[in-house]
Amino acid sequence: MNKSFYKRIKNKILLISVAFSCSLATTQANAMAVPSGELLLADIVVSGIVRIQGNNSQTTETLPGINVVEKGTQNGTITDAQGNFRLTVKDNAVLVFTMVGYKSQEIPVAGLTTFNITLAEEGRNLDEVVVTGYQTIDRKMFTGSATLLKGDDAKREGITDVSRMLEGRVAGVSVQNVSGTFGAAPKIRVRGATSITGDNKPLWVVDGVILEDVVNVSNEQLSTGDPSTLIGSSVAGLNPDDIESFQILKDASATAMYGARAMNGVVVITTKKGKIGKPIVSYTGNYSTYLKPSYNNYDIMNSADQMSVYTELARKGYFNHSDASRRQDGGVYTKMYDLINAYDASNGTFGLKNSQEARSAFLERYARANTNWFDILFKNSFMQEHSLSISSGTEKSQLYFSTSYLQDNGWSIADQVRRFTGNARANFNISDKISVGLISQGSIREQQAPGTITRISNAVTGQFDRDFDINPFSYALNTSRTLTAYDEDGNLEYFRRNFAPFNILDELENNTLDLSLLDLKLQGDFAYKILPNLKYSFLGALRYAKTNQEHKVRENSNMAMAYRTDDDATVQAANRFLYRDPDNPEALPVVVLPYGGFYNTNDDNLVSYNFRNSLEWDKVLREIHTFRFFASQELRYADRQNKSFNGVGYQYDKGGVPYIDYRIIKQNVEGNFNYYNMSMRYDRFLAYMANGAYSYKGKYNINGTVRYDGSNLLGQARTARWLPTWNVSGSWNLDTEPFMEQFANVASRLTLRATYGLTASMGNATNSSLVLQNGSTRRPYLSEVESMIYIQNLENSELTWEKQYETNVGLDAGLFNEKLTLTLDSYLRNGFDLIGPIRTSGIGGEEIKVANYADMQSYGLEVTLGANPIQETDWGLRTQLTAGFNKGKITNLKNDPDIWSLVTPEGGPKQGYPYRGLFSINYKGLDPYQGTPTFVNEEGEEGEDVYLQSDQTQYLKYEGPVDPILNGGFFNALRYKNFSLSALVTYSGGNKVRLNPAFKTTYSDLDAMPNIFINRWTLIGDETSPYHNTPATSAREVSAGFEGYPYNNYNYSSARVVDGDFVRLKQVSLTYNLPAARVKTIGLNNLSLSLVANNMWLIYADKRLNGQDPEFYSSGGVAMPIPRQFTLSLKVGL
Amino acid sequence: MKKISLYITILSLLAFSGCKDYLDQAVDQRAALDTVEKVSELLATAYPQADYVTFTEAASDLAEDKGPSNTINDEENRNPYFFEDVQSRAQGSPSLYWYACYTAIAAANHALEAISMAPNATEYNAQKGEALVARAYAHFMLVTLFSKVYDPTTAGTDPGIPYVTTPEKVVLGQYDRRTVAYVYEQIEKDLTAGLPLINNNAYRVPKYHFNTAAAHAFATRFYLFKKDYAKVIEHANQVFPGGDIKTNLRPWVSVYSTLTANEGLAIYTQATENANLLLTETQSSWARNYGAYRYGLSTPIVNYLYRSNNVTGERWIFPLYTQGGGDNWLILKFREHFVRTDANANIGNPYTIFPLFTAEEVLFNRAEANLELGNNELARTDLNLYASTRIEDYNAGTHGITNAKLRNFYGTSTVKEGLMAALLDFKAAEFVHEGMRWFDILRHKITVEHPTVEGQVITLTPTDPRRVFQIPQEVILAGIAQNPR
């Protein structure tokens, strides 16, 4: 028997491919094959039409093959192509209408003979079930804390990254748009942070498979603006139109299926499936345009004010004629002196006459320039997004295909994106027992961004350095409006940067970052009903992602020119891009990039597999006891590869032939920098889990899970790699109690839930066995350098997973016939065994170890209030208010951070404070004689110098948490006839924000200054006036005498911190659905038009922000804020 | 149907059992110590990569308060001068040196562990030798700086430092300081076991490893502290082939004194210099600051050591330089190797290369041992030998160290005392900026007096507990006590 069965299975598998191409034919064959049963015992003939709900719930359609069965008998029939059925039944019979993919209905005959039934789609009623990615569970039996968000509801036209759709829609989920650039993930937290050193990112699950990040960009790294952030969003390759629903799993019970990586919550995305019915073709087109940023929204001096500050600086000894030609950076003043110095021997004149009048005239042009950099660098560009999907299906097979194309011409002149996605999904019910599903998903992305290199955190001076930064947004904010992009003749005008000529327009053309990404997923699942109540399922997925960044620095870009500027000995000595040969101590630095530019590449690749076997068994005893058991075993595998190559001397305009001076390689090798690099990271994971649930009459439900997870990430020790976790939960459906019957018309649904359990995740430590790394010794001469192995981390045999006990209590209520719905959740989390740095005696050989010892506590409250007060045919109003409150505290952490790590905008961890607290250098007012800022330094004394690398942090001022304590949204949708209007307002607050750094020790004539500089200290006594309390621009000889960097300290002082609270009108959308009748006449099913405005208005924020976005970290590189955007959206159904 | 479930069960079981080794995959490309070459590379880090010079120099009598103008006033330099504990753990602090020594010891211990588990342990002999000697050296430096100086009468009770011979595998390992005598025993054991195994051919850059010369040089220092003088001489004579120290001394007269400033800064710590027996790269800003530290080589000390005639009746040839201020004297020895954090960064870590053992020290150690053994003339020969390489146009007749010169110059009554005084002076001049004076102060129980510009004088007597530098307070976590104050 087993042999023949095997063959049969094989045949069926073969059939799948056949069915793929001719599914309609097979359906009909099936339909005719259905036996009509025994009709002899019939008493009454019933007939009617069964319809199914169409793709959008306003239309219905008929379908052949809908089952109509007399309940409890074999007697039944199916509908014909027009939806008609006819059946003879007993007069007390109950008719059961069933169709795969639709909710079945049971209608008592009760004397009727004609039935007009419409079956609702199962997907439409997703709130009745909870999709955990592994199982689909009846909402009544679900005991955890989870929130469902339907794709159609969440979808925000014009927003291309699906992760941003969660913003303000789910209580307890905070979405911070630290960068708005395509591909950069927002900072997402579900119920705050659980790990002090880990990533705290939620787990993304798409169609049951965990979506691995191609490159792990931590939440802190997201705000750096580095190129790697562009591939930080794991969901950037998803077509928003493919999404059926989001399910956000929040507590231990809900996330139990994902165990060891789910401590930070899980976002389960379900993509659309084919629907039973005739093929439905849908097209969505979004056409968007951005608004340019405007100086009105920012606090930047105009060119006249700016020039007057320059004049003061010139008086104070800056911008000297004498050293103009040797200055690294220079604007108007530098240019003026250069012209004065430029002697033309042929006619005996200078570029500019050195007279007071000539100089004034020269400067006046620039004082009047008032260049609008936003206008020059940004455009009201056009973005188009087309998405086409075809869905079709029969009872035996359902197919869904979609493809989309996104073309974003970019907000600034330096960026653009193209994305293609394709998705094919097929589900087959091969027999009553066997079903098979196949998914192929792919996306291709091509993106261009301004060329950039990695940011360096400079704890010495207290600033972030990024050489050659040409981020258009930062450039516009930080570049003096006295500079002009074009000269009087309309040619590009160059000023000096890094000793070389610089023009932003020219540079953006010559210094680019090209990113390409290919992401392909193949997935298959198989389910087999061994017994009617025992089901085996298998799921397997393969994902293959390749990303490539090409940083192209062309030979005439400023970045390349900076490497070959050696005008005179002073410049040679000062230009750090030249090479000083250690073998020749007396020689001056020399140019090592005589020709060509750079061609630097960086690739991140991922190969991952995922396999899962699961068994599900359920049993209902006498309609009272419901048992459900679920067991699964899972294997995950991911290999990540990173490789980079720094090509020097690439000659873009000479046929791409590199010119390599060996000394530039030597320079890098001597500095311990490798010109190429390849590294691998291997992620292996195994898990076993079992879950049992019991329900008594659907009233009382209890649920328990045990898991056993294993991972190689902690290192090779066998003891550390395995971890058991568990949780128990229960719910009580109060509405089913007899005593609630009297309130039935008030509370139609009332459930109390509670969960308690242990969750865990892998921390950022891999040293359960010794970690040795290779490197080369730091010695000055190549002949003395040798390869070495060093101990990066000693073995920590006590290493284990980071853990947390979580208690969640929740309430779900539906009031007044579901007109008002309420979900309340409160939780308490006790994190322990968290990884943190600890200072040891050092005797073992490691001064600071990472160990599982830290503790963190957090608690929170989540409220979701929904209301459907009006639900008329013509009128409808829907409103939803979400609020999530989360407060946490590190209760045990023996790290000793330095001042710099605590005062940066991202904040730092410290015992007794939140996960990331923002601290400030305590500002003590201006020095009364010089107008320089003074502070409490690391020793508790007042002074201008603060040693930022000191670990004496007790004199810092604690400002508040970096992450909002409270956030949520308010969503309203109003429908009138064919119009609907919706608005989403989001809010967040309770956190502190550091203002962008605006002060420097010395300024060049390139710098733009905020208007607060108008209030700068100029005279003795100003320090006491509220209007002149901004630090002075110091005279050159004064600044030369500074100890430390008082102006940088000021940027990180208590004077530069504001509240992070804000309320934002995130989206307004107006939609018009063409009346069905009219649409039909032009041969369409439906047609709608929407006008959407995104990110329109920051309704409330701290005034002192002066245009700075409270969410956005202006870090240069590839980071850009989220633009204001208008979108016209067209939806057509065929 | 039953069969199918059976198949599924079997399949799953297969899947489960096939995964037994699935999690053995290393998470990244970390190295494993499974070849001779890799063990050898690990031993490149078995040397303390931090400097003791910053604090030993400031605590010694080669430092004097130069006042606040044009000088750098750092805790790592200031506190040792005032014989106060350094709280900082930054470069140049005793704490960092403590950590660095134990980091070096951990590397040696892991190498030794790997060797003991290797099937072909004999192939690792050279590595074993290096690991043992390196482990002995790091412990020796720890016991010298953080415990009382070796005194045969009290060493059995003076607290030592934890002598670590096995890798630590828990977060907070527990240790015992034992006694100075115990630590010396262990050092000698490792040294005598390791030294014969050392093979210079096993090194790619021998000057950065315990080559045979460096190991013997270390032995001379160790036995000098242990007062086993015959062994000092025995090892000193094995440092160079044929016991030829002279030709290996630094050519100050013929070469160093003729160089430009930049060349002079570079040459002193180069591996090509014969006098350098063992070099180590350390994270240290000493090269940047050694001239400008407030508590450093002041004009009076320079006048005594270099700008007036010494016992030979002549001045040393060392060219004197100043840095950013008239009092900031320096002799060109160190050049900073700045390791940038990124190819284009302005920031990074300063490295200073230190010669840990030199031919000069071997010569002085031999001379001192000879003096202690009563071989005054052998010692006098060595001192004359030294002087001949540091005096321009040296003439043995006019520059030789005579008893009369010793008497006149030092006012000492015995030849031994006179020669010892000369030896310590010569060493002070030779090793200025190298922190070596502190070891002589310890061994010879010299009282140190530190005047301040405010007129205060701080005195460190031979029995002062502050002669022992303080160890980090976190040692409490390891179950041991800090040094008494």
Image (cartoon, coloured by chain):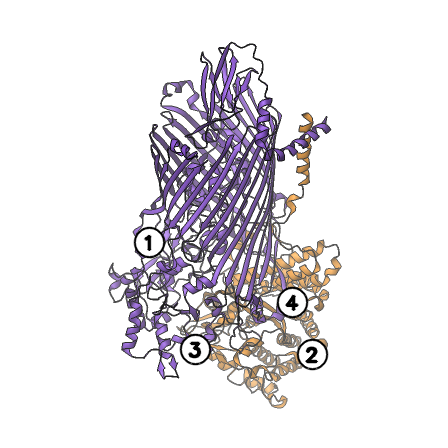
| Mark 3 on the same chain as mark 1 | no
Mark 2: few, some, or many residues within 10 Å (few <14, many ≥20)?
A: some
Q: Nearer the viewer, mark 1 or mark 2?
A: 1
Left or right: where A1029 falls relative to B444: left
**Mark 4 on the same chain as mark 3:** yes
Question: Which residue is denoted by mark 3 in the rendering?
Answer: B325
Q: Which residue is mark 4?
A: B209
The kind of residue tagged 4 is: His
Can you identify the residue that label 1 sits on?
Answer: A1107
Residue at disc 2, secondary structure:
loop
Q: Nearer the viewer, mark 3 or mark 1?
A: 1
The chain holding disc 3 is B
Q: Which chain is purple?
A: A
User: Residue A77 occupies which quadrant of the picture?
Assistant: top right
> In the rendered image of this protein, which colour is used for chain B?
orange
Q: Is residue B347 left or right of residue A531?
A: left
Marks 4/2 in contact by CB < 8 Å: the verdict is: no
Task: Kindly identify which residue carries mark 2.
Answer: B244
Q: What's the amino acid at mark 2?
A: Asp
Coordinates of residue A123 in the picture (x, y in percent)? 48, 31
Q: Position of residue A367 (x, y in %)?
A: 29, 68
Q: Secondary structure at mark 3?
A: loop
For the point 67% across and 59% down, the residue is B38
Q: Secondary structure at mark 4?
A: loop
Q: Dot 4, crowdedness within 10 Å: few (<14), some or many (≥20)?
A: many
Residue visible at 58% across and 29% down in the picture: A25
